[in-house]
Amino acid sequence: PLGVVVVTGGAGRFVAGGRCESAARLDGRAAVITGANTGIGKETARELARRGARVIIACRDTAKGEAAASEIRAETGNPQVVVKKLDLADTKSIREFADSFLAEEKELHILINNAGVMLCPYSKTADGFEMHLGVNHLGHFLLTFLLLERLKQSAPARIINVSSLGHHGGRIRFHDLNGEKSYNRGLAYCHSKLANVLFTRELARRLQGTKVTANALHPGSVYTELVRHSVAMTWLWRIFSFFLKTPWEGAQTSVYCAVAEELESVTGQYFSDCQPAYVSSWGRDDETAKKLWNVSCELLGIQWD
């Protein structure tokens, strides 16, 4: 339900957004969720595990990942929650993760590109990409490329890209993708979230007829560790936590996109609060989507036709 107010101990709290109402089971299905050691990703992993899925938590901090996996296994009674090392800021790590996954896992039905960075001071990935672009877009672009054949073999399958309402403030600045001429960390985040939307759009177009879908979503304004790089934002989010979603609430649209039966053949869409949402005009530009695809392939040194 939308706009519900929950009152506890005499104080109200706005619970923003929709809830995934689907009771679909995921027994025998496998899911990879990036950044599932904390926040929205962890709650998404918990919910998919509760529904019987084999869940692979792909994260940089494997100690946190193991703690999350242990907690989820104990709570859900599902022993099939495992952790694999993945650093999206290093293409070598991404390739090592994919090689390990493909050697050990025979099926992949759900890929949730959830991990992200936000408001980072200017820095570059191991491969020299601006951090927001490198982790939020290029890292997931490469990961999806490397796992796509397994998804096709396991079809019907779903790819879910966690974007943001922030994509409305984004532009694809092809003349300065790495922010070397000018850099604003808030805008860099928005640019990367627009890239998620455009990647989803072009990926869905290319996957038509494969029974592999690709959708993007806005999880809502969620109080998570994502703002850890900004002291000011951390304090603001604490002050206004009354208006923010919990990680569980924020995970609802990811879960909806992963399990809802009515979305089995829906692709190339953008969701918020478990329903279709408005995409900026930049996010609907097919030519920009195609150009970004080609430039991403060039930057990563891959051929993805």
Image (cartoon, helix red, strand yellow):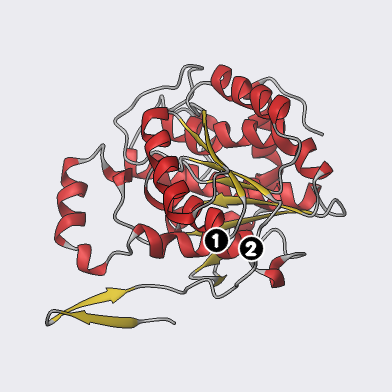
> How many labels sit on residues?
2
Circle 2: residue type: Val
**Residue occupying the point 79% across, 36% down:** 149
Could you tell me if residue 92 is visible in this image?
yes
Q: Which residue is more in the foreground, 108 or 299?
A: 108
Q: Residues within 10 Å of mark 1 (few under 14, many from 20)?
A: many
Compared to residue 220, the image places residue 150 above or below, namely above
Taking the image as shown, residue 256 lies to the left or right of residue 232, namely: right
**Residue occupying the point 48% across, 55% down:** 76
- Is disc 2 in contact with disc 1, using a CB cutoff of under 8 Å? yes
Which quadrant of the rendered structure holds the N terminus?
Answer: bottom left
Compared to residue 184, the image places residue 91 above or below, namely above
Residue 280 x, y percent position in the rendering: 54, 61
Give me the disc on residue 204.
none
Q: Which residue is more in the foreground, 121 or 110?
A: 110
Q: Marks 2 and 1, Cα distance to the nearest angstrom?
A: 6 Å
Circle 1: residue type: Val
Taking the image as shown, residue 234 lies to the left or right of residue 183, namely: left
Compared to residue 273, the image places residue 118 above or below, namely above
Residue picked out by circle 2: 259
Residue 163 x, y percent position in the rendering: 50, 52
Which quadrant of the rendered structure holds the C terminus?
Answer: top right
**Residue occupying the point 56% across, 55% down:** 48
Residue 9 x, y percent position in the rendering: 13, 79
Provide the secondary structure element on which disc 2 rests: helix
**Residue occupying the point 37% across, 44% down:** 38
Residue found at the far right of this picture: 209
Could you tell me if residue 279 is visible in this image?
no
Quarter residue 21 falls in: bottom right
Residue 188 x, y percent position in the rendering: 40, 39
Provide the secondary structure element on which disc 1 rests: helix
Residue picked out by circle 1: 255
